[in-house]
Image: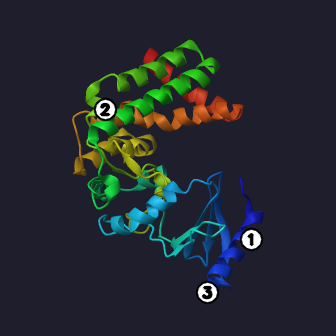
Amino acid sequence: MMDSKHAGPLFSYLCKRHPELSGESYRVLSSSLQNMILIVGERLIFRFPLTSDLTSMRLEQRILPKLAKHVPLPIPQFQYVSGRKDKICYVGYPMIPGEPLEAEHLQKMDDRQRLGVAKQIAEFLTALHTFTGSSFTRVNSRELQAEWRKNWSGYYRALEQHVFPEIGRKERLWIMTVFFRFLYPSEHFRFQPCLLHGDFKNDHIFYEPATGKLTGVIDFGNMRMGDPAYDFHDLCFTFGEPFVREVASFYRGPLDRTFLQRVTGFYTHILRLSSLYHSVLRKDWEKFALRLEWLKEKTRELDD
């Protein structure tokens, strides 16, 4: 993982490539195994991928300009892009105003404001999920549905291999039940494939506190084709099932009969299960203990 000591050389590199940035202030917004993100001049966001796989960044470059004309909220528009021969890869775009939509912010809103947010989210997801302005969105539905099922089956086997040895019988049974209830009904895989944000979580949804209105959506690095219900999973995890149902009431995308069942019965658990899985791989036993407590709580709910 890069830390703040790497920010200086990265910013210097930017200034060499784009002299107009010289003299601007800069600071590290975040750093991870995947990206270093700098804010330049408190008005531009620069993202530096730290992996050799640039597939997702290239996809964003292709799709976001067209998608921006189709969705009702601002999304990143790259004004700075590294050349294919550059040793350091990056993209830069004007900062989208606002702040992340936290659960406590939504709780403090009155009914009118909350419904307004639900409607804005639904309109954004409707536009995203009905976008067909790129060859990337032209897929064979049956093949993608089969691949989607295969990938989640593989994910279950990974949990079985790495997580099951570390947990008790009740916890294993709960995970098995969640996956089997999702994987076996064929109707769960008759969804209409669409373009997904792929990481549509609350800290990628920006809003203006003074008005309670959404101001934009960021971070399309996990964009892909798939089940539209998947983009609702963090809404359910963070804001709860009642809010998801409010969003769904305004949603005009491909809403099939088992849509909400997939959201509440399966996808909403993926964040915690992924965290559990990665904590075992990284031998982060402190985080594992926290996630295991969540899992035990789920098994207690079954006992009740």
Quadrant of the rendered image containing residue 207: bottom left
- Marked residue nearer the N-terminal end (3 or 1): 1
Coloration mode: rainbow
Marks 2, 1: nearer the viewer: 1
> Mark 3 — residue?
20
Q: In the rendered view, does 91 fall on the left or right side of 128?
A: right
Query: Type of residue at label 3?
Result: Glu
Q: Residue furthest front?
A: 85
First-in-chain label (3 vs 2): 3
Q: Secondary structure at mark 2?
A: helix
Q: Secondary structure at mark 3?
A: helix
The alpha-carbon separation of the residues under discs 3 and 1 comes to 17 Å
Q: Residue at x 72, y 57 (%)?
A: 2
Residue 188 image point, x, y percent: 29, 31
- Which quarter of the picture shows residue 48? bottom right
Q: CA distance from mark 3 to mark 2?
A: 52 Å
Label 1: state its secondary structure. helix
| Mark carried by residue 261 | 2
Quadrant hosting residue 146? top left
